[in-house]
Image (spheres, helix red, strand yellow):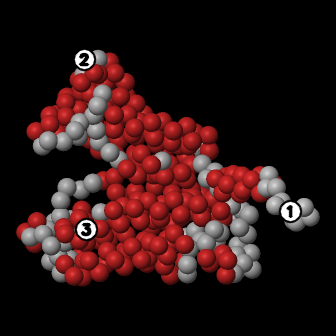
Amino acid sequence: MTRLLRTLDAFWFPPAPAARLAVLRILVGAFALWLVGSHYAMWVEIGRSSPTLFAPVGPVALLRHPLSPEVNQGVIVATVVANVLFVLGWRHRFTGPAFAALLMWVISYRLSWSMIYHSMNLVALHALVLGFTPAADALSLDARRASTVAAGRDPAGAWQYGFAIRLLCAVTALAYFVTGLAKVASPMGWSWATGEVIRSQVAADALRKGVLGETGGPLFQLLYDHVWLFTVMGILTFVVELGAPLALLNKRAGQIWAVVAFMMHWGILFIMGITFRYHLSGILYAPFFDVERLVGWRQARGRRRSSRLIPLYPGTP
C-alpha cells in the first residue's frame, strides 16, 4: 500500500517550476481572449435568436429560458475583462476562478443555439484547471506584488505546479480517449480503421461543403483514389485517440504523442478542410513540454543583444 501511495504521489504531484504553469496560463488565456474577442459580435447576435432554437447544454441546462440579449452581452463583456486580468495574473485567487466560470458559461451558451463544436470543450476545461490552481505565482502582476516563497510556495519547483500541469495533460488525454471510445461504440465501430469508411466520410463532408458553397480540403481530390492512405489515417486516428492515456506514462511518451496528434490535426485540415483551431495552434499540447524555456530563451536573447550594444560616447556605460 505504501509503495502504491508513493507511486500515485510521484505521478500526480511531481515538482515543476511556477514559470511553466504561468506560461500555460498566458498561452491558454491568450487563445481564449482571441476566441471570445474575435467572435464577440456573432456570439452577441446568437443571443438574440428565436427562443425556439435554444437547446441548453452544460451548465446552461440550468436555464429554462434563454437570457435576455442585454444580459448575455453583459456576460460576454465580463468574460473578456476577466480574461485580460487572467492573462495579466492580477488577483488570480479571485479573477482566475471567475474567468474560468465565465468562459465555461459563454462557450456553453454559444453552443446551446446551434451545432455543438466539441473542439471548444478543451479550452474551457484547461481554463478551469488554470483558474483554480496557482497559475499566477510567476510571470504575473501578483508575482510582482508579493513573493510566492514567502507564501510558502517555491517558484523554482513545487508539487502545486506539477499537479496542475499533470491535470492539464490528463484532461487532454481523456478527451481524446473518450472520442476514440465514441467511434468504437458507434454503428461503424472498428470499421473506422478501414480506408473505405473514412474515405466515404471525408467524401460526404466534401460534398456537403460544396453544396453550401464552402471550400473543402485542398488535398482530398488528389488522394481520393488512394484507399490505403485513408486506411493509414483511420489506424492513426485510433492509435492517437485510444492510445492517449499512454501519453501520461512518462514525459517522452507524452511529447511523442503530442507531436503525432498535432500533425494529425494538420492532416485533417489539408485533407478535410476541418479546422480545430485550439489543436492547430499547438497550445493544447503545451502542457507536455517545458514551455518555460520560451521565457528563458527570450531573456537570454535579450542579454546577448544588450551585450552587443556599443556606447555612443567613450566612457559611457
Residue assigned mark 2: 225
* Residue neighbourhood size for the residue with mark 2, other residues' Cα within 10 Å, grouped as few (<14), some (14–19), many (≥20): few
Residue assigned mark 1: 313
Q: CA distance from mark 1 to mark 2?
A: 70 Å
Q: CA distance from mark 3 to mark 1?
A: 54 Å
Residue assigned mark 3: 41
Three-letter residue code for mark 1: Tyr
* Image quarter of the C terminus: bottom right
Look at the picture and state if 101 lies above or below 297.
below
Residue 15 in view in this figure: no
Three-letter residue code for mark 3: Ala
Helix, strand or loop under label 2: loop
Nearest-to-viewer mark from 1 and 2: 1
Image-quadrant location for residue 188: top left
Q: Nearer the viewer, residue 142 or 152?
A: 142
Helix, strand or loop under label 1: loop
**Where residue 78 sits: x, y (%)?**
36, 79
Q: Earlier in the sequence, mark 3 or mark 1?
A: 3
Nearest-to-viewer mark from 3 and 1: 1
| Residue in view at x 14 percent, y 37 percent | 210
* Residue neighbourhood size for the residue with mark 3, other residues' Cα within 10 Å, grouped as few (<14), some (14–19), many (≥20): few
| Residue in view at x 29 percent, y 22 percent | 223
**Circles 1 and 2: CB distance less than 8 Å?**
no
**Where residue 11 sits: x, y (%)?**
62, 54
Look at the picture and state if 44 lies above or below 35.
below
| Residue in view at x 19 percent, y 30 percent | 203
As drawn, is 288 to the left or to the right of 14?
A: left
Q: Earlier in the sequence, mark 3 or mark 2?
A: 3
As drawn, is 295 to the left or to the right of 206?
A: right
Q: CA distance from mark 3 to mark 2?
A: 42 Å
Helix, strand or loop under label 3: helix
